[in-house]
Image (cartoon, rainbow, N blue to C red):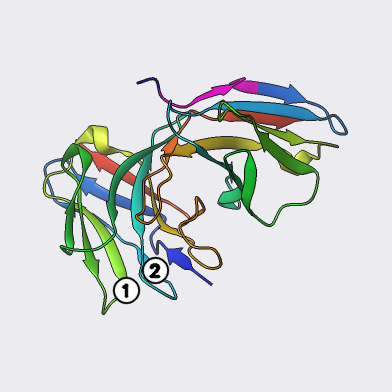
Amino acid sequence: AQSVAQPEDQVNVAEGNPLTVKCTYSVSGNPYLFWYVQYPNRGLQFLLKYITGDNLVKGSYGFEAEFNKSQTSFHLKKPSALVSDSALYFCAVRDDEGSGNTGKLIFGQGTTLQVKP
Amino acid sequence: KAGVTQTPRYLIKTRGQQVTLSCSPISGHRSVSWYQQTPGQGLQFLFEYFSETQRNKGNFPGRFSGRQFSNSRSEMNVSTLELGDSALYLCASTQKTSGGAHEQFFGPGTRLTVL
């Protein structure tokens, strides 16, 4: 079965420092990976996705993610954190088992990012 | 383009009642997926509709059902509500094409509280 894991419930970082939010995945075929962010009382906002191609994917709000096939990881990064980046971050993989090209995403448990001034 | 809209935003029901939630996707998007978000279980897939047909279903009891209309708007229904159904219900739409992996755009959610 396809799955993603976010090993950290919370990540704390000082404003201006680089941040990393970790994600590992387990899929049977090619992975289609996504990062979303959720602010309080809001839905999820798309940040970036990996389908194929360059291992470094650039996304919204200065975020990027590095796809590493050998380590089955897709960590989210940002060179310089902002207080406004504080939110709940979700890694997700598209579930391709069965019919393929589905609208079903499997989400990790989420990581709360706390950026302190 | 307007985003995904969900109505109502907040809902309070009592055990045993039923509820219907509505989702209007982004114009031109034909695929609508529903998710349940709870603190304990996280984000869980409920079902996906495409061209008025259910394409996928998650591991939820039959009390959870949905449908999609010809204009791609979707509704989900929960019958015989239980306390554990209290959750944020999120709807997402995507532009479905053959191949590729298109991101899903999420609505703000409906916060359902069952008393």
Indicate the quadrant where residue A30 lies.
bottom left
Q: Residues within 10 Å of mark 1 (few under 14, many from 20)?
A: some
Q: Secondary structure at mark 1?
A: loop
Confirm whether the magenta stretch covers residue B4: yes
Image location (x, y in percent) of residue A97: 52, 68
Amino acid, disc 2: Tyr
Which residue lies at the image location 43% right of the left edge and 52% below the top edge?
A110
Which residue lies at the image location 11% right of the left edge and 49% below the top edge?
A79
Q: Which residue is mark 2?
A: A25
Chain identity of mark 2: A
Q: Residues within 10 Å of mark 2 (few under 14, many from 20)?
A: many
Image location (x, y in percent) of residue B17: 85, 29
Amino acid, disc 1: Thr
Residues B111 and A83: in front is B111
Image location (x, y in percent) of residue A95: 49, 61
Q: Which residue is mark 1?
A: A72
Indicate the quadrant where residue B104 lies.
top left
Image location (x, y in percent) of residue A36: 36, 45
Residues B96 and A68: in front is B96
Specify the segment rendered in magenta.
B3-10
Confirm whether the magenta stretch covers residue A77: no
Q: Badges 2 and 1: C-beta atoms under 8 Å apart?
A: yes
